[in-house]
Image: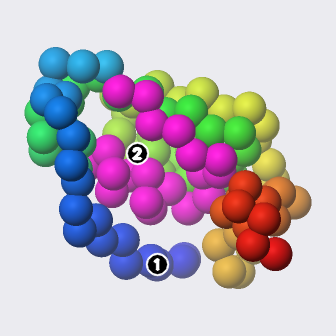
Amino acid sequence: TLKFDIHIEYIASPRIDDKTLIITDPMLATGGSCAAAIELLKAKGVKKIRFLCTIAAPEGVERMRREHPDVDLYIGALDDHLNDHGYIVPGLGDAGDRIFGTK
């Protein structure tokens, strides 16, 4: 089982406790960062959260269902699995590199 230490240091926003929030991310792999972000938002009083991603791995979907069953997931494509490094297989490569052209 892969373990990653997720730590959110700072959040700045207007009043969000009475809003419906849509969290977007290109990929849902292990689900660690998404679950942590949702936990933080719930601690700020947000009750209506949706999550939208382009591609996901079953492991991340399962984690989200287990830890945040009240959050609706909208997934463009569900890939096969995560590899030993926590990358989606077959996946898209590094989404950040693709978006920002860093590689």
Position of residue 99 relative to residue 24, above or below, is below
Q: Earlier in the sequence, mark 1 or mark 2?
A: 1
Q: Could you say where residue 50 lies in the image, as x and y percent from the top left? A: 43, 27
Q: Secondary structure at mark 2?
A: helix
The stretch drawn in magenta includes residue 38 = yes
In magenta, the rendered stretch is 21-39
Residue type of the residue flagged with mark 2: Arg
| Residue 81 in view here | no
In the displayed structure image, the side of residue 55 where residue 59 appears, left or right: left
Residue 41: image location, x then y, percent: 23, 42
Q: Is residue 73 above or below residue 56?
A: above
Q: Is residue 38 above or below residue 6?
A: above
User: Which residue is pictured at 65% across the width and 72% down the height?
Assistant: 86
Which residue lies at the image location 54% right of the left edge and 77% below the top edge?
2
Q: Which residue is the extreme one toward the front?
A: 101
The quadrant the C terminus occupies is bottom right
- Is residue 69 at least partly visible in the picture? yes
7 in magenta: no
What residue does disc 2 label? 66
The residue sitting at 35% across, 39% down in the picture is: 68
Whether residue 57 sits left or right of residue 2 in the image: it is: right
Q: Give x and y (percent) for residue 37.
A: 33, 51
Residue 1 lies, in percent from the top left, at 54, 77
Residue 57 or residue 28, whichever sits in front: 28
